[in-house]
Image (cartoon, rainbow, N blue to C red):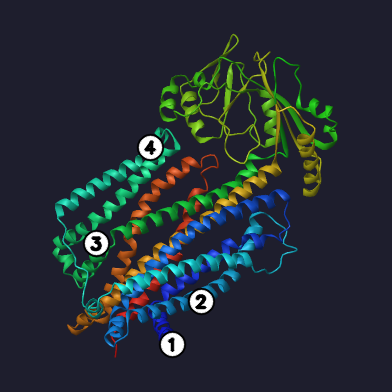
Amino acid sequence: MMLFKLSLKNIQKSIKDYAIYFFTLILGVAVFYVFNAIESQTVLLNVTSNTKNIIKLMTNILSGVSVFVSFVLGFLIIYASRFLVKRRNKEFGVYLTLGMGKRKVSMILFFETILIGIISLAVGLLLGTVLSQFMSLLVANMFEADMTNYAFTFSKSAMFKTFLYFGIMYVLVMIFNTRLVSKCKLIDLLHSGKKSEKVRMKNPVLCTLVFAVSCGILGYAYWQVTGGVYRLSSEKDIFIPIILGVIGTFLVFWSLSGLMLRIIMSIKGLYYKKLNSFTLRQISSKINTMVFSMTVICLMLFFTICILSSALSIKNFMNDNLRELAPADIQFEYAIDPEQENHTVEELLKRKSLNVDEVFKEKISFDTYMFDDITFQTTLGSAYDEAQNNYSFLEYTAREEFMKLSDYNRLAELYGMPEYVLEEDEYIVIADFDSSVEMRNSALKNGETIRIGDVEYRPKFKKCKKGILQLSGNHVNAGYFVIPDNAKTDGHNARNYLVANYNAGNEEEKIKIEAGISELMENTWNNDRISYNTMLDIKESSIGLGAMVTFIGLYLGIIFLISGAAILALKELSESTDNRERYCVLRKIGTDEKVINRALFKQIGIFFMVPLILAGIHSVFGIKFCNSILETFGKDEMLKSVGMTSVFLIAIYGGYFLITYFCSKEIIKERK
């Protein structure tokens, strides 16, 4: 009972000085609960069956991500416990001096861990329950769900999962603390406050050499994911620049811990100004002893910036793409077999008892054409070598697709695209996939011609015109050719398309019509040469993918950001505790309190900024790589997403910085 009371008093004392530790635990529990409670929160939402399946898939993926998140939080909790135990070495030394055995000291830590666990779980679950209600609103907004039947809910499954995962974490902390205390020596505990981490002056020549090597490694990794990205022959090759990035980051921090002090020391006017010498040595000491930790934190921040920027941009892309890339209700595509009797989609549907004229309005039917001797390679002409060098994985022997001008203009009118006029020997390329547009523009700029029959056609424009052929949720139109109506296309019919809007007055009627078409296609159709796509399907799939990526990105981004900031904060608070006597000495020699606080602010600010700056540099190239991956969604919204990510980063990371400063200021304050 005495040990329990002692543990309770210790926690009460620690809350003031180490509020960040408790805040991080509570925040971790709340975030863990919120993202695992989504399934329970969305059960009452009125959505379609397809959307329910998408939400179920999303929650299953989030459950899998939670396993990884639990490892990250577990590492964070153990890491934080190490600092808390270190801070109290002198206290434990006093206990041992008074005759208390190491077993009882371990029991004190055991009770403290249990109490901390109960407090953090209780407060975290309470906070998570409140936040999860707002998460429900976000989910409903993303899926455009009806919240008529929505009610306040508490997820028992999420609570159980939170108890299980965090319970395991706390058990590991208990084992770690017990092992740590058992290895302690009394003399080390009593004199821990007088021991300091030595600032080892590394060889400046070696540091300079290592720094140059690290810059070279990072430069090569940056080139691989930007200028050399398309030279990566397979998805496995992406691990090469990742590994190089990790090694380069580690070497930067290793060399920086020696270079920074040497460089500033050589600038006498700066080094001896006010408390700069004291501040710099403090920073160098921390970086020198935290090379691995700073590397991990930097990479966490890098992944946070890239993950959040990409996730938020995909969500924005999806919403914008729906209006631009799915402008009609339905589109059928029929691959014509030249050896069989040709049909149109409309004829095939009528044979299956679908009254096309009654179900559809504003419908258009047209054919596209392909020629055996006109391939992607032949249309690129002299631009082929450069394209093949940069995009070696593309299929250049694929036949190009052609459309008559009158058919294109009818489609353009329905889709809301520009209409064109052609001379008898001109063609236009319609595309919106950025990589393909870049290659085709090179060919068009060179004036590459194509021959159909006896006629040679030249490009009307020096660039591709933006547009689509098939309904989609992404920018995937690699390009098709629009040619004059009098072009000889006999015997080259490749596909027949039917594009239409439903003859419906509201969304419910559209859903009913689409359900009937879906049943017809699934149950009565045996020909796999016909396919169809609808705006509603694209909408649900796009919203579902956008929601999944957004939630997973937010989940991982928040956890990485909290973990990185918390590790830095705990390290700084621990250092402030260890260096309290140094600040007392500064006061004794007449240093003004404002100067001390300013030096502390600079010290913490630089300590937080160093990994963030390098992570920001990594992110410039990381986001460029993400752009190349996400080009099918478009790129216009990426800048906006980076801005939102920056606000997010400043709020959380900056918040940890300010809390750390004020807590450290309280720790080093002169006791009266």
Q: Earlier in the sequence, mark 2 or mark 3?
A: 2
- Out of 212 and 379, give the one closest to the viewer: 212
Asked whether, in this view, residue 358 is left or right of residue 83, the answer is: right
Alpha carbons under labels 4 and 3: distance apart: 34 Å
Q: Earlier in the sequence, mark 2 or mark 4?
A: 2
What amino acid is at disc 4?
Answer: Gly
The residue tagged 4 is: 227
Which residue lies at the image location 39% right of the left edge and 83% below the top edge? Answer: 10
Asked whether, in this view, residue 52 is left or right of residue 346, the answer is: left
Q: Is residue 10 above or below residue 241?
A: below
The residue tagged 2 is: 118
Alpha carbons under labels 2 and 1: distance apart: 16 Å
Q: Residues within 10 Å of mark 1 (few under 14, many from 20)?
A: few
Marks 2 and 3 close (CB-CB < 8 Å):
no
What amino acid is at disc 3?
Answer: Asn
Indicate the position of residue 348 as horizontal and vertical percent values. 79, 26
The residue tagged 1 is: 5
As helix, strand or loop, the secondary structure at mark 3 comes to helix
The residue tagged 3 is: 288
Q: Is residue 182 above or below residue 416?
A: below
Indicate the position of residue 649 as horizontal and vertical percent values. 44, 61
- Out of 66 and 401, give the one closest to the viewer: 66
Asked whether, in this view, residue 476 is left or right of residue 385, the answer is: right
Q: Earlier in the sequence, mark 1 or mark 3?
A: 1
Residue 237: image quadrant is top left
Marks 2 and 1 close (CB-CB < 8 Å):
no
Circle nearer the viewer, 2 or 4? 2
Circle nearer the viewer, 4 or 3? 3
Residue 502: image quadrant is top right
Q: Can the viewer see residue 519? A: yes
Q: Is residue 631 above or below residue 407?
A: below
